[in-house]
Amino acid sequence: MFENQHVVEEQSVVDEFMLVEGEHNWQQDSAIQAEPQLTIPFPSFEQQIRQLRLAIFVLLGVLCLAVLAIGLTIRKAQYEWYWEQARGAFRDAFFRQSDYLPAAQQGTPAADVTAVSTTSLSLSDFSSNTGQKPTQLPSPSPLPTDHPTALPSPSPTPFPLKEAPEAYYLSGFRYEKQKANNCGPTTLSMMLSYWGWQGDQDTIGNVLKPTTRDKNVRWDELVTYVKTSAGWLDSMFRVNGDFALIEKFIANDYPVMIETGYYVNTLWVGHYLLVTGYDANTKTLRVHDATGGPDRDLSYDEVDELWQQFNRMFILVYPVEDQAKVAFMLGADYTDEAQNRQRALERAEQEAKADPKNPFAWFNIGSNLTYFDRYAEAITAYDKAREIGLPWRMLFYQFGPYRAYFYSGRYQDVEDLASATLEARPDLEESFVWRGWARYMLGRTNEAILDWNSALEVNPNFADAITALEYVGAR
């Protein structure tokens, strides 16, 4: 009996547990069933197509931007050329008046250099630092050609030189394609690379022409850069070069840089070329041309016609310890700068006599006479060259006429030539400075100050403009 009662009690406990557990499970199931179900709708086929198209468009956009960025980096120089060409075409259409520099007016009188004194000039708006007006007009900086690098007299003891073979070519250059208005720094960069220099055209250009507007880097600026920024190297320039001299230097492992006329799309410009070899049999020079490409072969006749247009100027770069050797190779006709100019003058006179219609021969006569301060004779030669016809870009590169006319008192000629040049391309600091001095001497000081400030906009480092402004107390 007790046993049966115990079994009944156990069964009651089990039933009660099952009832409670069942209720608990039912509550859980109810809770689970009560939870909201999260469903993710699968996109339709049309939606998938639209999403795929959007992804493709985004990817293409990113690729286009990447290509554009790479293109802008790699082809920046070409884009700059396009801009310069477009800008030049605009100025040619609306500003440039002629394909030639203006000729001298018949009977142009020379001003009395002493007649225009500083006391008669309008300086009221600009007082000097000392509070006094200038009492003596300073000479504008001398032309670059006035003070070439002095070299020692040729050594009486000969240096061992290699005899020039029939043909000889140098190697070891790093060719560069020039950026806009940058042939001088680019050609010098290629020349320096031969001697182990590691920079490029921008390294030089950033120093010599801080803005891309600057159209020209003068030969003296290039020489100065070598002397001040490549300490183990020296440099010099001379005029009246010839092919025998080039052959001698190339054969003895010295490249030669020359400045010549040049034609780009039939338009005349000035240009530097780096001579790296020659062939005396075929009468050709091999040059690195920053515009036309590396290893170009040009005939002696072609080069000489263009080289004459720059008085056959050449630049040498060499290790400092080779200075005496270079002087020996050049000889007295080149180491003595006055003798070098005299020989250049005689050559130009012979060429003008042989071809009286050659404006460059007359121009070279004027430039070499200007070196000797023989201004009255120089302006006669320059007048003749202008009468025959000089390219309108001539005074982008050579400034002898400005100096000769200025010191002859023909200030209006200086202004006329500079204005014609600047109307074509308002990016020439030398022309701004010379026009400023002419206007200053004509009593138009405020206009002169504007010109000198314009020169600094083109080249903020141009010392001649800074000196002029300081002289009138405008800086």
Image (tube, helix red, strand yellow):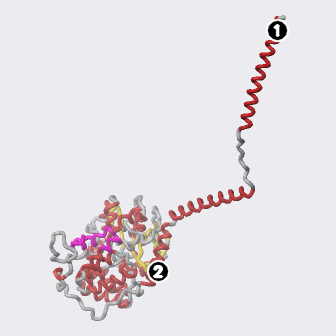
Q: Residue at x 17, y 75 (%)?
A: 134
Query: Which secondary structure lies at badge 2?
Result: helix
Q: Earlier in the sequence, mark 2 or mark 1?
A: 1
Q: Amino acid at mark 1?
A: Gln
The residue tagged 2 is 89
User: Which label belongs to residue 386?
Assistant: none
Residue 336 visible in this rendered orientation of the protein = no
Q: Amino acid at mark 2?
A: Ala
Q: Position of residue 106 (x, y in %)?
A: 30, 94
- Whether pointer 2 and pointer 1 mark residues with C-beta atoms closer than 8 Å, the reply is no
Q: Quadrant of residue 376?
A: bottom left
Query: In the depicted view, which residue is nearer to us: 136 or 323?
Result: 136
Q: Quadrant of residue 246?
A: bottom left
Which class describes the residues within 10 Å of circle 2: few (<14), some (14-19), or many (20+)?
A: some
The residue tagged 1 is 5
In the shown orientation, is residue 464 left or right of residue 177? left
Q: CA distance from mark 2 to mark 1?
A: 122 Å
Tell me where the magenta segment starts and ends, as one range.
Answer: 453-475
- Image quarter of the C terminus: bottom left
